[in-house]
Image (cartoon, rainbow, N blue to C red):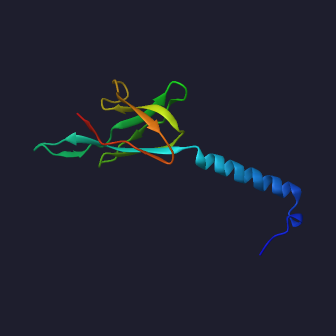
Amino acid sequence: MRVNPRFIPKQGRFYLLLFLFLFLVGTASSAVVRGRLDRVVPGGGRGGAGGIRVTVSTPRRGRSPAVYSAQDGMYYIYNVPSGDYHLEIWVNGPNGAPMVYPVSVREPYTDIPAITVQ
């Protein structure tokens, strides 16, 4: 079934186009940064490092809100605009110096290889 555009008021068409534009801009301009933090466990194996603060930062955009790795070591940082960042891993809490890795964020996901922390 086809709708004749004459039956949609001009003001309604404007709001529909505005909504579609904002929706597309909002969904197409951010990425998810995801990765895993590991610890060396007794016996030489590796296990997830949970409860570690992770952020991304850049001088132009500042620092993202902190996320914390889950018990299995996985972390996810949502709504990161595409660009070049520093991945910061705060092993000693927010007052210590972070471990810093350069990352290039691309849409829709940026997967970071597993990182071993002490």
Question: Residue 11 occupies which quadrant of the picture?
Answer: bottom right
Describe residue 92's horizontal placement relative to residue 17 as left or right.
Answer: left
Residue 83 in percent (x, y) is at 51, 35
Residue 64 in percent (x, y) is at 49, 34
Residue 50 in percent (x, y) is at 30, 43
In the rendered image, the quadrant that contains the N terminus is bottom right
- Residue at 34 percent of width and 30 percent of height: 93
Describe residue 57's horizontal placement relative to residue 18 as left or right.
Answer: left
- Residue at 22 percent of width and 40 percent of height: 39
Q: Nearer the viewer, residue 111 or 52?
A: 111
Q: Is residue 57 above or below residue 80?
A: above
Tally of marks: 0
Describe residue 37's horizontal placement relative to residue 28 as left or right.
Answer: left
Q: Is residue 107 above or below residue 100?
A: below
Residue 4 in percent (x, y) is at 85, 68
In the rendered image, the quadrant that contains the C terminus is top left
The residue furthest left is 43
The residue furthest bottom is 1
Describe residue 70's horizontal placement relative to residue 105 as left or right.
Answer: left
